[in-house]
Amino acid sequence: MKKQDKKFYITTPLYYSSGKLHLGHCYTTVVCDSLARFKRKDGYDVFFLTGTDEHGQNIAKRAEEKGITPKEFVDNLYRDITDLWSLMKITYDKFIRTTDEYHEETVKKIFTKLYEQGDIYKAEYEGWYCSPCESFWAESQLEDGKCPDCHREVSRAKEESYFFRLSKYGDKLLKLYEKNPEFLQPKSRVNEMVNNFIKPGLQDLAVSRTSVSWGVPVPFDNKHSIYVWIDALANYLTALGYMSDDEELFKKYWPADVHMMAKEIVRFHSIIWPSLLMALDLPLPKHVYGHGWLLFGGDKMSKSKGNVVDPYFLVGRYGLDAIRYYLLREVPFGNDGVFSIKSLLGRYNDDLCNSLGNLVSRTIAMIEKNFDGKVPAKGNFKDSLDKELKDMSECLIGKVREAVDGFNVPQALTEIMALVYRANKYIDETTPWTLAKDLEQKGRLGEVLYNLAEVLRFVAVALSPFLPDTAQSIFDKLGLGKVPDDFDSLARFGGLEEGTPVTKGKNLFDRINIDEELKKLEEE
Ligand code: MSP
């Protein structure tokens, strides 16, 4: 494939938060940002979409409680979310708000099309309604009489509604899962969807509400508004201009390469969304990935559970890349990860400070001391230790790519850290401090330090999609200017030029005394 033919359309869920934003909210978006940054550098034409979910009863209720209009409420939400993404250095290509006019117009067109072709019909509905989730449930779907998603109380509700013929898509979905096991990942989620939802039989879905005024009105029946999930899911199409005067982006990027989200909303994305797309006769996304939750004290971190962790506080105190690294590395992809300050500080000290930071400072300090701060000449890489380091470096980007292609970001970081560990071991094996004592060994010392500096260049470039600031700091120390926009320079070990001026400067990460820090945090 030629480079310009490679496209990658990646989406986060649309965000909605009625309270303060917490670290859990950052998880999906930081993962998507790293994948998007990686793919851009890997020659893909990337479209990274994120946005806010701004309609529905919950928003209207929250706004009323606060004594503001829903519009004011969602403007605050939009400001808070975009501020948070600036803090986390999220490189989205487009930010969509479901109150954007173009989005609302297309949602109406989609609804009308589905109605006209008979995929949506009007009837009376009675069922169990979960107000926080804005979802109707059949008796058989309740868990202990409560909402199967959030486990809160449900109430009996009856209303005239428009229905989407979801029941019609059960067999098609089963075929999709059978023929395309890669569609929904990780695989464990497939069983859950197939056995708990599809096989027992899908019921038609109520897709309008008469009780909710803060929403997109059904264009031909104004007392109804369109169900918030239909409105929200459609963003993946409307953001590309689907059904608008300008469908260029849609033609270029659809179908999505991956919709990324946490597990509790996988059902909407892996059952309702593909069914809607089939009804619209559109190609399906290539992958839907449902990651686990970031748990705090054993529970999902969310405002309603009262255990908030503030990203501003954490980034302010430990630096952005420490937090990005923790999110990307600590949560086993696909499974839940338990957040604790102790594990955050442990990762920080072990991986970032002692391993990466030390490798950088030791290497550069030795070049400053023994070679007047200039990268020495390279050797011929024939020594077996040198060759091993060279081979490992040249394989690095391939391994990281493989992990990224499987959406396994922790694995990508593990691969990079493996080279860091290997290089630290190389220092112990080659003992440059001993070589430095013997004038006759100056040539060998130069080769060893060259190899270490060259490893740092590889590590920095490979790390740049995940920890962009750290990568740039390593480049600054190596006197290499801006981290390149592609991975081409990682094809060959030995590209670093002799004589490049290096500067040790400040530590990348200062060691934290964990006991003292924990005590301080408790006292604050
Ligand atoms: N608005 C819906 C999504 C509509 S998509 C068409 C929604 N919004 S949300 O703000 O509640 O959640 C946004 C994303 O953040 C979801 O993937 C959600 O699961 C994720 N997270 C919120 N708290 C989380 C954790 N503690 N851990 C990991 N992800 C979590 O759902």
Image: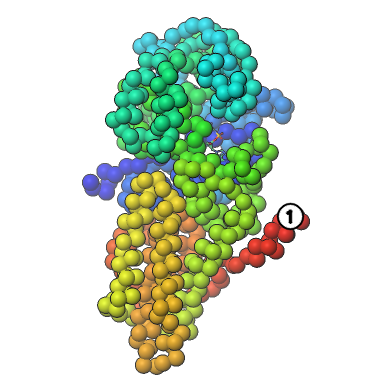
Left or right placement of residue 374 versus residue 134 in this view:
left
Q: Amino acid at mark 1?
A: Glu
* Image quadrant in which you'd find residue 79: top right
Quadrant position of ligand 1: top right
Is residue 121 at least partly visible in the picture? yes
Q: Residue lying furthest right in this view? A: 523
Q: Residue at x 74, y 55 (%)?
A: 522
**Residue 328 vertical placement versus 250 (above, below):** below
Is residue 453 at least partly visible in the picture? no
Q: Residue at x 43, y 73 (%)?
A: 425
Left or right placement of residue 96 versus residue 169 in this view:
right
Residue 80 image position (x, y, % from top left): 61, 40
Residue 8 image position (x, y, % from top left): 35, 42
**Residue 399 vertical placement versus 430 (above, below):** above
- Write down the residue under mark 1: 522
Q: Residue at x 50, y 67 (%)?
A: 355
* Colour scheme employed for the rendering of this structure: rainbow
Residue 66 image position (x, y, % from top left): 72, 29
Q: Residue at x 36, y 46 (%)?
A: 406
* Image quadrant in which you'd find residue 24: top right
Residue 259 image position (x, y, % from top left): 42, 36
Q: Residues within 10 Å of mark 1 (few under 14, many from 20)?
A: few
Which secondary structure, mark 1? helix
Q: Residue lying furthest bottom in this view? A: 439
Left or right placement of residue 380 versus residue 235 in this view:
left
The quarter in which the C terminus is drawn is: bottom right
* Image quadrant in which you'd find residue 128: top right
